[in-house]
Image: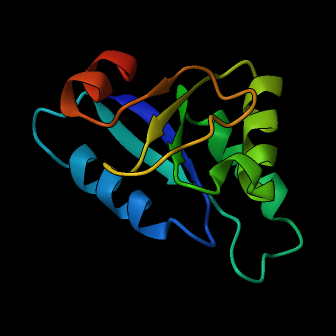
Amino acid sequence: MKTPIFVSFDFDNDRKLKDFIIQQARRPDSPFEVVDHSLKEAAPERNWEQKAANAIARAKVVLVMVGPQTYRAPGVLKEIRMAREQGKRVVQIIGYREGTYTPVKGAGQLYRWNWDNLAKILN
């Protein structure tokens, strides 16, 4: 059985990271499946926070995809808070090969993105 995950990411700067992790989840040997992803949109609905909380409730793990500005993305910080309030495991993974990244406060250990790490932390 695959581990259900919620993907949190900086909607304004790193939407392609969500697409990349969804592609990896579709691999036949993937130990995880994406049950939902960050719901903050450019013009969010009034009730996006409730929708996000419901989506996080369906996941076993919240995976934070870290880009250069993720550590200060308001939607990501709210999703992490929701996950912690629900007692969900939160992990963060660097979304790009190059660059310097600041860990997101409250999001757990920061890992490099590779298949071995994904399999280990999302099992």
Going 89% across and 72% down the picture, which residue do you hit? 46
102 and 95: which is toward the camera: 102
Image quarter (top left, top right, bottom left or bottom right) of the C terminus: top left
What colouring style does the render use? Answer: rainbow
Q: How many numbered discs, if any?
A: 0
Residue at the far left: name it.
Answer: 28
Residue at the far bottom: name it.
Answer: 43
Residue at the far right: name it.
Answer: 46
Tell me which corner region of the image, top left, top right, bottom left or bottom right, holds residue 68. bottom right
Left or right: 67, with 16 as reference point: right
Residue 1 in view of the camera: no
x and y percent of residue 26 in the render? 20, 49
78 and 71: which is toward the camera: 71
Question: Looking at the image, is 81 positioned above or below residue 46?
Answer: above
Image quarter (top left, top right, bottom left or bottom right) of the N terminus: top left
Left or right: 118, with 67 as reference point: left
Left or right: 103, with 4 as reference point: right
Residue 7 in view of the camera: yes
Going 50% across and 45% down the picture, which residue do you hit? 100
x and y percent of residue 54 in the render? 71, 45
x and y percent of residue 4 in the render? 43, 33
x and y percent of residue 73 in the render? 74, 57
Going 31% across and 28% down the picture, which residue do you hit? 118
Tell me which corner region of the image, top left, top right, bottom left or bottom right, holds residue 11. bottom right
Question: Looking at the image, is 109 positioned above or below residue 48?
Answer: above
112 and 44: which is toward the camera: 112
Going 66% across and 63% down the picture, which residue do you hit? 39
Tell me which corner region of the image, top left, top right, bottom left or bottom right, holds residue 105. top right
